[in-house]
Amino acid sequence: MGAQTILVVEDEFLIRFMLADSLRDIGYEVLEAADGEEGFDILSSGQLVDLLVTDVRMPGGIDGMELTRRSKSLAPGRPVIVCSAHLFRSESHPADEFLAKPYTVAELANAIARLIGDPWQKSSQTHSA
Amino acid sequence: MAEKLPDPQCLIVADADVLIRNALAEYLRHCGYKVFEAATSDEVIIALEEGAVKIDALLADAQLTGRYNAFELRLWVKDHFPDVEIVLAGSIDSAAKAAGHLCDEGPHLQRPYDPESVAAHIKRLLAATRRQDR
């Protein structure tokens, strides 16, 4: 069985690389997307994604909030962590966790572990398509 | 005392299509490389100029977009980072083949699986997203 897979959607290249690299070091499989449209391409491709981490403000037609809604539509049980410097917790929003920027990798890793457990925990069967 | 392992060699995989980029990068990670994934030529330039790690090679789609197209980027890299090996690929099959060659040259000197299967995997993913678009 493979490790749990996290999709990181972030338009800032170096932040995306640093987050993905750190999560790989912890043991998760990580898929990277540079904006919401790429994130949705991955979610629509049938690849297993156990958890979505997304920035809110990104270029293109799909921001992080819209991506969260689409992810929940495809796989209601798949947890989503939304990260932003301009964040307002909304009761109507379907994200499972909010992280206000700036946050540390440890804070993100803790939030991920709360939602899906360690990298080798049995996948929650959140096939996207 | 345990011997310190050498730092992994670093590559950039640059492709505007996230499904192609992800699959090539994952294959090369399985070969033992550390891989930066770049969606545009601008991101390639950031990775090289940031300079925190030495980049050994760039595998880029010939249709790459951004501040520079792929061929302009190739000239820029040769000018600014002459030690970086540059491979431009014009198709999924040629990109997978190039990744296979990098794997042969790479840290582990063995292929975890055939690059042809990477190309087939990419094509399956692309077909799946096209079905979703209908």
Image (cartoon, rainbow, N blue to C red):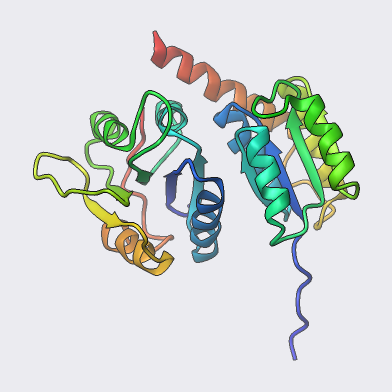
Q: Quadrant of residue B25?
A: top right
Q: Residue at horizontal 69%, vertical 62%?
A: B52
Q: Residue furthest bottom?
A: B1
Task: Point out the residue furthest to the top here.
Answer: B134
Nearer to us in this view, B6 or A12: A12
Q: Residue B17 location in percent, x, y? A: 58, 26
Q: Residue at x 18, y 48 (%)?
A: A88
- Report the front residue among B110 and A56: A56
Q: Is residue A60 left or right of residue B1?
A: left
A75 lies above or below B127: below
Q: Is residue A11 visible?
A: yes
Whole-percent x, y for residue A18 in the image: 54, 57
In the rendered view, does A101 fall on the left or right side of B122?
left
Q: Residue B46: where, in percent of width, then height?
A: 66, 46
Q: Residue at x 40, y 26 (%)?
A: A44
Image quadrant holding the C terminus of chain B, namely: top left
Q: In this rendering, does residue B87 appear at all?
A: no
| Residue B54 image offset from top left, x and y in percent | 77, 58
In which quadrant of the rendered image does the N terminus of chain B lie? bottom right
Number of callouts: 0
Q: Residue reaching furthest left?
A: A91
